[in-house]
């Protein structure tokens, strides 16, 4: 039985957006395309459950400011999504609406109203956490006891030193690691939007790779995934869940010695690498390029965090009995953000 849509042009354009525009024009990677699909499907689910509109009856006019604002509220109350997730869904819906407007499916006035929707404020008090050099070292030492110790140590070392996203590291092929004439190695990442970047790694990583490949890639098929799981006799790309299980075991061991250890997850290695680079004096534009950030403002967050650390330290100094500013008068720069930045060397 043929399915009849009330607005077949809308359905056709959404399909074209997913199958052609994101793939060929925007050159988005598979994970990004899946994210768009999931966000749009959630919006259609919202229209069905809340607005009582069947999938076949959805029209372009249903993509409007009122519905999308309520959709964001629905994500928070009914699906218990946090602000970052809600804003991610909003960004995906905005992207689709911009395309629909280009294709004259959505009016310019409707798009302007949708563009006015502000991101949801994150009311959570989230501490920006990262691992110290010692904690990184402790993790790498702990995985030496694993059955797959050579693989796990190389995986986590590469994850930290490259500063790559977990999805980027798990998508690496053998051919993406290329030795240099100095005995080190460059890793070639294809990140968000298939953007290519080259990240230099140390000779220690090259030695680990050599040991790892001799055990796990004796045939050195350059098109094989660097990290894989054998299932039914086939090599399958390692999943994020596999990495999470490695870290869960490691966290259990280390927490016995260090009860204050933060929860370990793969993104901590990227975040820790960035913070260590910044603390070592590496310029923000270099770190931004290293991490593959499309906007340097994302990288500036590390500078902001370090500024807050300095602010806390100065506050403690001001409260100390041995402080130069030991009096009932608050530290004179306490509420002067510009002065604080100058004192911290950020202006």
Image (cartoon, rainbow, N blue to C red):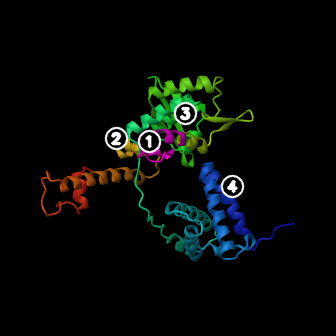
Image check: 52 left or right of 29? right
Is mark 2 in CB contact (under 8 Å) with mark 1?
Answer: yes
- Label 4 or label 2, whichever lies nearer to me, is 2
Question: Residue 80's spot in the image, x, y percent?
Answer: 56, 65
Q: Is residue 59 above or below residue 139?
A: below
Q: Residues within 10 Å of mark 2 (few under 14, many from 20)?
A: few
Label 4 close to label 2 by CB (< 8 Å): no
Q: Residue at x 49, y 31 (%)?
A: 186
Mark nearer the N terminus (4 vs 2): 4
Residue 162 vertical position relative to residue 127 in the rendered view, above or below: above
Q: Nearer the viewer, mark 3 or mark 1?
A: 3
Badge 3 is on which residue? 152
From mark 2 to mark 3, how far is it between C-alphas? 28 Å
Q: Secondary structure at mark 1?
A: helix
The reply to whether the C-beta atoms of the residues labelled 2 and 3 are less than 8 Å apart is no
Q: Residue at x 59, y 75 (%)?
A: 67
The x, y position of residue 127, in whole percent, is 40, 55
Badge number at residue 282: 2
Residue of label 4 = 19
Depth check: 106 or 314 in front? Answer: 314
- Span shown in magenta: 248-273
Question: How far separated are the C-alphas under marks 2 and 1?
Answer: 11 Å
Residue 260 relative to residue 329: left or right? right
Circle number at residue 177:
none
Horizontal and vertical percent for residue 163? 46, 41
- The residue mark sitting in front, 4 or 1, is 1
Say which mark, if any, is on residue 290. 1
Q: Residues within 10 Å of mark 3 (few under 14, many from 20)?
A: many
C-alpha distance separating marks 3 and 4: 36 Å
């Amino acid at each position: 039985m043929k399915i009849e849509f009330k607005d077949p042009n809308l359905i056709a354009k959404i399909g074209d957006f997913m199958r052609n525009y994101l793939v060929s024009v925007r050159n988005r990677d598979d994970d990004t395309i899946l994210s768009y699909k999931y966000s749009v499907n959630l919006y259609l689910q919202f229209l069905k459950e809340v607005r009582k509109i069947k999938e076949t009856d959805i029209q372009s006019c249903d993509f409007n400011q009122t519905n999308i604002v309520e959709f964001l509220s629905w994500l928070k109350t009914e699906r218990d999504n946090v602000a970052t997730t809600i804003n991610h869904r909003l960004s995906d819906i905005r992207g689709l609406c911009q395309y629909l407007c280009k294709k004259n499916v959505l009016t310019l006035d409707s798009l302007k109203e949708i563009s006015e929707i502000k991101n949801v404020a994150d009311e959570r008090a989230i501490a920006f956490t990262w691992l110290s050099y010692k904690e990184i070292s402790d993790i790498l030492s702990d995985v030496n006891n694993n059955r797959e110790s050579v693989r796990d140590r190389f995986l986590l070392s590469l994850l930290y030193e490259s500063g790559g996203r977990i999805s980027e590291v798990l998508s690496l092929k053998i051919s993406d690691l290329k030795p240099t004439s100095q005995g080190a190695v460059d890793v070639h990442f294809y990140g968000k939007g298939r953007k290519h970047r080259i990240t230099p790694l140390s000779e220690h990583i090259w030695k680990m790779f050599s040991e790892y490949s001799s055990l796990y890639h004796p045939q050195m098929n350059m098109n094989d995934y660097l990290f894989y799981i054998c299932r039914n006799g086939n090599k399958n790309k390692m999943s994020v869940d596999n990495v999470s299980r490695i870290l869960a075991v490691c966290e259990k061991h280390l927490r016995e010695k260090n009860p204050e250890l933060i929860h370990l997850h793969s993104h901590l290695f990227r975040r820790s690498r960035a913070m260590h680079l910044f603390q070592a004096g590496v310029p923000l534009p270099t770190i931004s390029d290293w991490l593959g950030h499309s906007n340097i403002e994302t990288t500036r967050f590390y500078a902001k965090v370090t500024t807050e650390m300095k602010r806390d330290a100065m506050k403690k100094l001001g409260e100390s009995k041995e402080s130069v500013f030991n009096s009932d008068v608050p530290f004179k720069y306490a509420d002067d953000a510009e002065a604080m930045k100058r004192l911290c060397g950020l202006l």
